[in-house]
Image: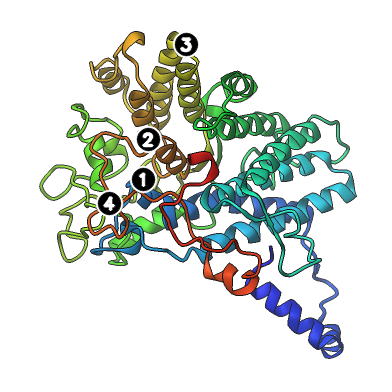
Amino acid sequence: MRSLLYYTCLVLSILSISSCKKYLDVNTNPNQPNKATINGLLTRTTENTALNVYRVSTNITSYYVQYLASSNTASPLDTYEDVDASVTWTSLYDNMTDIYDLEKMAAEKGAMHYRGVAKVLMAMNLQFIHSLWGDAPYTTAFDLATLTPEYDNAQNLFQSCLKLLDEGIIALKETTPYPIPGESGTAKSPDLIHKGNASAWIRTAHAMKARLLNQLSKTGEYNTNAIFGELAEAYTSTAHDASVATWDVRNPWNQVALNNRNLLLDGWLSEQFIDAMNGKTYGIFDPRLPLMTDTTKYGDYRGTPNGKGRTGSGVSFEETYINLTGFYSSSNSPLFIITYDELKFIEAEAAFRANDKPRAYTAFLEGINANMNKMGVTPANRNAYVNHSSVAVGEANLTLDHIFREKYKALFLNPESWNDARRYNYQYKDFTLPLNAVAGNFVRRMVYPSVETSRNGANVPPGITDVTKRLWWDQ
């Protein structure tokens, strides 16, 4: 769906088409293209797909899973108030509009690998819409045949994501006379995620399918064999991770840390997350914590309770924040879309549910090891953690709690953690409602944003005001 500004301009153009045409004729620069190139669209959409991971996280999910906490008392995000996520909604739909244009241009050129990438990118962005809001415009949202597109059913959106990924895989397997630059590994590529490598995109499409199929764990459609089938075609190491690490200035989490240092307070780490990492909750200090943040002025790690607000008046280092040099928040840190370590935890969960404890335990340990190795944890610290009695529980004693808590740590700042929290009913040890919460239960969904209700209100599902109402896959 086009942005509100685009719709406004379009309507004004229709109302005054003759004068606009004359004005545009006078100001047209014949030496400057007025249509995005296919490579320009690919660069923009791959970058914005990664940035949308950040936007969904920083605007919504990292507060709901208590990775982050507001520095202000009773912040709406902390306390489950009805938050207007118009910016996030618009960012997702703006990028999907560009992806729609990318696929259309690729089809016209017979550029099948571009078309395959476009389909995978569309699924990546659409799954956010589905997981945050449920029903939403999709089928008629991008062709401008209507400015008030009807809503697709949430379960149909889910199936659309799977279908897009299947179609993307087929397109990426075709021999194309129009390869993406960089596919040979030598040219600079407009593809910021996989540098034009079709095989890498195929692996990522299978990884996304495994993630989506695992989201069905509370439904009768959950199929562990289908998940195992997708995992077999996906990543085999962290080198295959889908991420973006090319920034005009800096990684956006680095900007959050910089803003915080400049007293635009943001990026405060939640007490829940810090306690899960510093040994208070699980009885073992996690060696990844020093690679994410700095100690307080007291020489320890202290989180901010969600809903309570900060202890000091500003950045006085009485609590911990995202820092400027962390693995996820340095200036050149990558933004991860989906990773090998996530897939190992998906495998561990699916194998556990299939009563294959040996496979589950092996995947569980590999997920931890892979994440720590990627972050640069020393072998000695890694081994001390993995061999601790709270982690090295053995096949027979492995539980879903072990799997979910370690996945929660490994997916720091990734929006997929909110899907996990809802699937697991927020049963993490010592995980409590925020202080000053306006709802008596944990948050389960987003309400529709004002940017949508104001321009497409007739199609917005009525009565969606309760953030504790569960979506179809979370019953």
Mark earlier in primary sequence (2, 3): 3
> Relative to residue 88, is residue 176 drawn left or right?
right
Give residue 166's mark.
Answer: none
- Is any part of residue 443 visible from this angle? yes
Q: Is mark 1 on a helix, strand or loop?
A: loop
Q: What element carries label 4?
A: loop
Foreground of the two, 460 or 375: 460
Callout 2 crowding tier (Cα within 10 Å): few <14, some 14–19, many ≥20: many
Give residue 356's mark.
Answer: 3
Mark 1 to mark 2 CA distance (whole Å): 9 Å
Mark earlier in primary sequence (2, 4): 4
- Mark 3: amino acid: Asp
Disc 4 vs disc 1: which is toward the camera?
A: 1
Mark earlier in primary sequence (4, 3): 4
Residue that label 2 marks: 408
Q: What element carries label 3?
A: loop
Residue that label 1 marks: 65
Foreground of the two, 374 or 80: 80
Report the quarter where the N terminus lies.
bottom right
Mark 2 to mark 3 CA distance (whole Å): 22 Å
Mark earlier in primary sequence (3, 1): 1
Q: Is residue 470 above or below residue 9?
A: above
Residue that label 4 marks: 321
Disc 2 vs disc 4: which is toward the camera?
A: 2
Disc 4 vs disc 3: which is toward the camera?
A: 3
- Mark 1: amino acid: Val
Q: What element carries label 2?
A: helix
Mark earlier in primary sequence (1, 2): 1
